[in-house]
Image: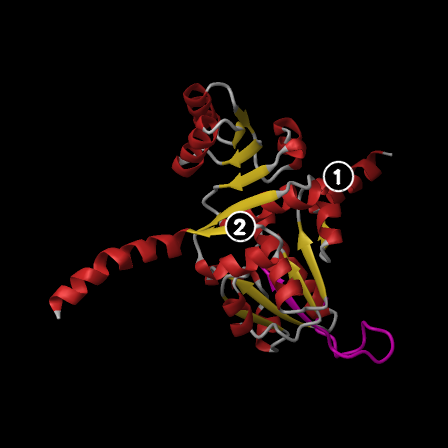
Amino acid sequence: MYAIIVGSGTTGLKVAEWLMASGAEVTLIEKIAEKQRFADNLLGSVVVLGDGIMIDTHNTAGTKRADLFISTLNSDEDNMLACQIAKHHFEVNKTIAISSNPDNANLLNLLGIDIVVDVTELITEKIQSLVAPLLVEDL
Amino acid sequence: MTQTSDGNSNSGVQRLKRVAVIGCGPLGTQIAIELSSSGNIVIVIDKDPKSFSALPTHLLESSRVVTAIGDGTQEVSLRQAGIQDVDLLIAATTRASVNLMSGQLARHVMRIPVVVCLVNDSNLLSIYENLGIKVINPDGLLMEAIKGELD
């Protein structure tokens, strides 16, 4: 299994660590040099310096032979573009995009991204499940 | 160019075209001016109301150019701006990913017949042509023009 992850924020790093521990081959893409060096030291020379929304970066990272592509940038638009490049140009089998705006989740699905992780919904659900019992006690 | 009456610049009998422009930066402003001056109605959408300041007053007063504050990547904003029946949408913000999301929303969800996105990466042209979106590379055109001058 070869996985590409775009963005070395907390999510990107955690997912990369987990995938590597599970035996997958991983390449991380990070466009800020300082963050790229940090992640590269942490994970052991698997971090490419480049912009995940540029095709050139994906040529370097080897997106063409990836089985899994995960975009974890803060911008929904950038995650959409990165995943569409992976899907439509490099024909990656499974693309996953993080989305922070629930209104975008449907659109990203419609545009061919295989899995959209709606962060706002996840957090809201978690808070609801924690708070709901307190509301019952209150009654 | 001063204001001209309808039809002077277009040959034959043509219906007024309605055009949406996403992003009112220097490029979006220029597109709005050009297209409204040649007899079309232009709706310009931008998140920042200050961005509309460069639009000429006479075009706004004659409602040739209509402004709407909103996010071009959000269906709600596009509907509020009244762009569901435009003939053409041009996504001209400074970010390629924003233009492509806005453009695909307009084309595939709102069924706008023609959508043009400005993208400064010629590698992306073929991907989006295949997805029904016309892509123009402003930087590429500029380079072509400069090279042309050198020949």
Q: Position of residue B34 (x, y in %)?
A: 70, 63
Q: Is residue B29 visible?
A: no
Span of residues in magenta: B1-23
Tell me the kind of residue under disc 1: Met
Looking at the rendering, in which quadrant would you find the N terminus of chain A?
A: top right
Q: Nearer the viewer, residue B104 or B149?
A: B104
Q: Which residue is mark 2?
A: A115
Instruction: Give the chain of mark 2.
Output: A
- Compared across the picture, whether B117 is left or right of B79 comes to right
Instruction: Give the chain of mark 1.
Output: B
Task: Using a 10 Å C-alpha cutoff, classify the residue at mark 1 as few (fewer than 14 neighbours), some (14 to 19) or many (20 or more).
Answer: few
Q: Which residue is mark 1?
A: B143
Tell me the kind of residue under disc 2: Ile
Q: Position of residue A62 (x, y in %)?
A: 64, 29
Check chain identity for marks 2 and 1: say if they share one: no
Residue pictured at 61% horizontal, 78% vertical: B62
Foreground tag (2 vs 1) = 2
Q: Nearer the viewer, residue B82 or B112?
A: B112
- Compared across the picture, whether B128 is left or right of B95 comes to right
Q: By what rule are the colours in the image chosen?
A: secondary structure
Task: Using a 10 Å C-alpha cutoff, classify the residue at mark 2 as few (fewer than 14 neighbours), some (14 to 19) or many (20 or more).
Answer: some
Secondary structure state at the residue bearing disc 1: helix
Q: Is residue A127 visible?
A: yes
- Compared across the picture, whether A31 is left or right of A125 comes to right
Q: Is residue B138 magenta?
A: no
Looking at the rendering, in which quadrant would you find the C terminus of chain A?
A: bottom left
Secondary structure state at the residue bearing disc 2: strand
